[in-house]
């Protein structure tokens, strides 16, 4: 979905390096999410933010941090990358009306930690 | 949020209807059923959602049993481009919780 962009799309880094993955959206949604996906598995939630001042840990937040710089921007950082953080990372936004919430995903960032 | 159970994989002949089941026996009264799909490492894509009634849109139909403990996503005329992993999710808005994607059903459409 072109309304949710992620940079970089691919990244190779070394163990111990700090790396930031960025997500931008033009959909005007308040809610944003970061997921990781390991090969053959479903998505696991890392962090989510319901607005600029609200950030929450997901099920696998250890080793990650986030920053919600603006409504449209939500960044994920690996302070000291390790090989088992090699994965596909997705950013998502969502909107909700009448009790229904629909998520919109970015194209993903493929990260390899050597 | 209620968890779901889906078969890990299914095949469907091209042009035929693909019927993907999902069990959500612990669903609560205010939880919606959502379906998403993920085509080969792309970001998941929303397909359809429902609460009690059957739903249809341009992509698919969703059949929810009367007791709401299971549902079926129907792709009426599957094409090769429908080959993907399909996720069934149940969730209620404003729970402060996440969508639980699970491992989904890998659908292969066979020529």
Image (spheres, rainbow, N blue to C red):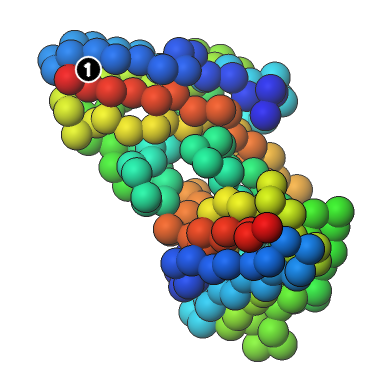
Tell me the residue at 48%/55% (across/down). Answer: B101
- Image quadrant where one finds the N terminus of chain A: top right
Residue A26: x percent and y percent? 70, 19
Q: Residue furthest bottom?
A: B67
The quadrant holding residue B20 is bottom right
- Image quadrant where one finds the C terminus of chain A: top left
Tell me the residue at 58%/51% (across/down). Answer: B84
Residue A5: x percent and y percent? 59, 19
Residue B48: x percent and y percent? 73, 57
Report whether A71 appears left or right of A47. right
Choose between A90 and B1: the one closer to the eye.
A90
**Helix or strand or loop: what does disc 1 sit on?**
loop
Q: Is residue A94 above or below residue B8?
A: above
Kindly identify which residue carries mark 1.
A79
- The chain containing the residue under callout 1 comes to A
Q: Is residue A60 above or below residue B82?
A: above
Query: Is residue A23 at all visible to an observer of this figure?
Result: yes
Report whether B99 appears left or right of A112. right
Choose between B80 and A51: the one closer to the eye.
B80
Choose between A50 and A85: the one closer to the eye.
A85
Query: Is residue B87 at all visible to an observer of this figure?
Result: no
The quadrant holding residue B91 is bottom right
Choose between A93 and A71: the one closer to the eye.
A93
Q: Residue furthest left?
A: A16
Report whether B80 appears left or right of A46. right
Report whether B51 appears left or right of A71. right
Q: Is residue A98 above or below residue A50?
A: below
Q: Is residue A80 above or below residue A94?
A: above
Residue A102: x percent and y percent? 67, 46
């Amino acid at each position: 979905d072109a309304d949710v962009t992620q940079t970089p799309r691919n990244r190779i880094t070394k163990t111990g390096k700090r790396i930031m993955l960025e997500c931008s959206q033009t959909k005007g949604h308040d809610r944003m999410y970061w997921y990781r996906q390991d090969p053959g598995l479903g998505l696991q939630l890392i962090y989510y933010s319901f607005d600029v001042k609200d950030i929450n840990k997901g099920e696998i937040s250890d080793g990650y941090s986030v920053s919600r710089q603006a409504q449209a921007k939500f960044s994920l950082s690996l302070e000291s990358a390790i090989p088992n953080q090699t994965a596909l990372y997705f950013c998502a936004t969502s909107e909700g009306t009448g009790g229904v919430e629909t998520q919109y995903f970015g194209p993903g960032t493929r990260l390899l930690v050597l | 949020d209620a968890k779901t159970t889906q078969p890990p994989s299914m095949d469907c002949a091209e042009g035929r209807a693909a019927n993907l089941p999902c069990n959500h026996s612990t669903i609560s009264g205010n939880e919606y059923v959502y379906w998403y799909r993920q085509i080969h490492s792309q970001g998941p894509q929303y397909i359809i959602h429902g609460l009690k009634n059957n739903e249809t849109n341009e992509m698919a139909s969703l059949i929810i049993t009367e007791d709401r403990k299971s549902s079926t996503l129907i792709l009426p005329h599957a094409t090769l481009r429908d080959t993907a992993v399909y996720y069934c999710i149940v969730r209620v808005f404003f729970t402060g919780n996440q969508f639980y994607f699970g491992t989904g059903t890998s659908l292969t459409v066979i020529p």
